[in-house]
Image (cartoon, grey):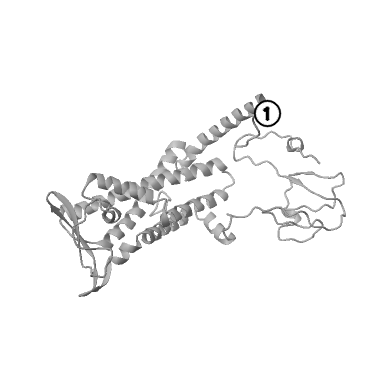
Amino acid sequence: MKVEPNKLDTRQYDNDPKTKPAPIILSLGQANAPAKTPPVIPGITPVPVGATKSPLTKPSSAQPQNHIAASAPDTEGCSVVCVVDGSIKGMPEKIAEYFKKGGGKSGLADFDPSEVATRNWIWGQVAGSAAFVGDNWSWLRASLDSKTSEGFKLVRAQIHLVRGKVRFYFSGYSKFNRVYGQGGFGPGHERILSIFAGVGKTSSSFAAIAKGVAGTFKGNALVSFIFGSATAIAEWKDDVKKDGYDLTAALFMSLLKAIIAAAIVIAIVALVIFVAMVGLGASLPVLAVGALTVAAGVVVNYAVETIDKALGKAATGDKSNTDGLASAVAPYLRKAGREIQAGWTYLMEKFPNDYQELIF
């Protein structure tokens, strides 16, 4: 038969994402029909018509009371197939629930007044630190050299000015060390860009910033970024007040904040190294530079999140807003979606043979 939802439910709903229309449940089959298995639809576990128990069938008390049934004239006795929405695809239910409840408030109001350090945020910092270690494991491991003539030593770096140019020299490594070597390395050297943020030359420092931003979307850092996006999706799925535009705004702001944080971290590392090695003439263990980068990443991410939440509250005028600027961006995306849909609908009516239905 032909099912027309607008005739089954004649109530007019607004565009507010908080509005949730009552579900329309279609019962397929006849009263007292023999049990049979319905066709298998990808992604949906079938429930035999007439079955009395199923892991997907809820007790009668849990069935929605406000619904409209469309079926054959005699509907009494027909079984209802319950399709239960799953969690994030491929993620075990317990893990999905863990991350769904990992946002919101941090519970550390005395130390975290901005409520930034939520459980999901902390896991994000752990993932980011692990990604940094994974992507830079070769030089981090080589900075601990146990094959020197004096036994275990930390490889150290020092800057010298040679003919007006900055050169990096390493000490404390053995002849078996394949990462560090004799001779001076300029700020534009790949190793100096990766470890020391290209300090010593303005163009090299900007190149290091560009390299750091691009590195956010490669290797283990990309996995860390995807992890952060997955937790954002989990939190979104747990909030029935939010729609797809809220999710799009949240992911867009996550991308923007990741780029800003990466650039700031590289700039901070370059500044600290410049002051310590050029200004004070000190030599630094290479491992300390790695620790500085990780620590700067956590601090900068916290600061960026705090500023984002403060700007979000100011932009929306809602002091209880914890979504940051994403909550201010979502309405613009929602408005654009309505305008695109309206334009497309007009084209469908004007040129029905050239345009087909498209739902935003």
Eyeballing the image, is 148 above or below 221? Answer: below
Q: Nearer the viewer, residue 204 or 250?
A: 204
Q: Is residue 253 left or right of residue 75?
A: left
Number of other residues with Cα within 10 Å of mark 1, as a class: few under 14, some 14 to 19, many 20 or more:
few
Q: Which residue is label 1 attached to?
A: 353
| Image quadrant in which the C terminus is located | top right
Residue 54 place in picture, x, y as percent? 74, 60
Q: Nearer the viewer, residue 270 or 155?
A: 155
Q: Residue at x 62, y 37 (%)?
A: 359
Residue lying furthest top: 350
Q: Residue at x 21, y 56 (%)?
A: 185
Q: Is residue 187 left or right of residue 356?
A: left
Q: Residue at x 16, y 52 (%)?
A: 279
SS of the residue under disc 1: loop
Kind of residue at badge 1: Asn
Q: Quadrant of residue 174?
A: bottom left
Residue 96 place in picture, x, y as percent? 56, 57
Residue 15 place in picture, x, y as percent? 61, 35
Q: Residue at x 53, y 44 (%)?
A: 247
Q: Is residue 166 left or right of residue 329?
A: left
Eyeballing the image, is 177 above or below 48? Answer: below
